[in-house]
Structure formats: structure tokens, C-alpha cells
Amino acid sequence: METIYKIDRKNAAYCYPLLEPSDLEETFLQLAEQWRVETGMMSLATKMVMHPAYQRIIGMGQPVVPLILRELEQEPDHWFWALQSITGANPIEPEQRGRLMQMAGAWIQWGKENGYRW
């Protein structure tokens, strides 16, 4: 497979490889599973989101947003940090904080309103 690179025009010193859509999804699913298995017993969200697999997902950038939203819709989990890090958005209202289902619902609604399809 030929590696395709995307250059960050804001800071041309950085470029990163782009994955084909099927490779992107496969990589995401593998990392998500690794993250779930290795953090399943953790109670601190800060430790969960600092896990290397979670951080690699964040590093995959905008292309994984629909995949995260799909995961969130199917099985709500702590994807909020990743979504906020990648998109810069935070649709969660103060009264929703700490309520996993409400937080997931806010992000799913945000995704739909912003044209994401999954």
C-alpha cells in the first residue's frame, strides 16, 4: 500500500501519513478494543484518557470522529475527551457532566448537527 501524506498547512514542518478508509477503521477498532481491555477496571477518567491507545486515536484526527460517534451511539463510553481534543467543540451542558448517557447524547446530537455520518 502506498503511503499518502497530509501536510499541515498551518505549520508546514509537520506531516503525517493518511490511512485508507478501511485501514483507518481497522486501526481505530483495534486501538479502541485495546483501550477498553486495558482500562476496563480504571475508575479515574484522567488515567483512561492518557492511555497510549486512546492518545493514538486522538492523533488520528478528524477522520476518526464518525467512528468515535458510532462507538458512542452503540455503547456509551468515555470518548468525550477525544472528541473535544479533535474537534475543539464541547456540546455538554454543565448539568450533563458526569451523566454518561446524557453526555453521549449531546455528542451524538452535535455530530448530526455538524454533518457527521456514521
Image (cartoon, rainbow, N blue to C red):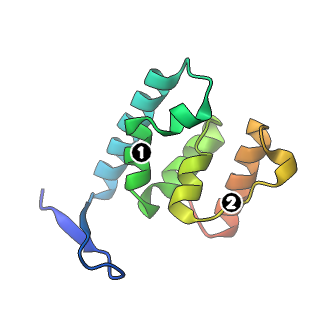
| Disc sitting over residue 90 in the figure | 2
Label 2: element kind: loop
Q: For residue 111, what is the image quadrant?
A: bottom right
Left or right of residue 118: residue 4: left
Label 2 is placed on what type of residue? Asn
Left or right of residue 44: residue 27: left
Report the residue that reaches farthest toward the top: 41
- Quadrant of the snapshot with the N terminus: bottom left
Residue 118 appears in the rendering: no
Question: 18 above or below 35?
Answer: below
Q: Earlier in the sequence, mark 2 or mark 1?
A: 1
Question: 116 above or below 102?
Answer: below
Where does label 1 land, which residue? 55
- What residue do we see at 57% from left, 54% from top? 83
- What residue do we see at 70% from left, 61% from top? 110
Instruction: Out of 94 and 7, give the one closest to the viewer.
Output: 94
Label 1 is placed on what type of residue? Gln
- What residue do we see at 57% from left, 36% from top? 46
Instruction: Out of 106 and 38, give the one closest to the viewer.
Output: 38
Q: CA distance from mark 2 to mark 1?
A: 18 Å
Instruction: Out of 23 and 13, give the one closest to the viewer.
Output: 13
Residue 23 lies, in percent from the top left, at: 28, 49
- Quadrant of the snapshot with the C terminus: bottom right
Residue 15 lies, in percent from the top left, at: 24, 69
Residue 42 lies, in percent from the top left, at: 56, 22
Left or right of residue 16: residue 103: right
Numbered disc total? 2
- Whether tag 2 and tag 1 are in contact, CB under 8 A, the answer is no
Left or right of residue 79: residue 25: left
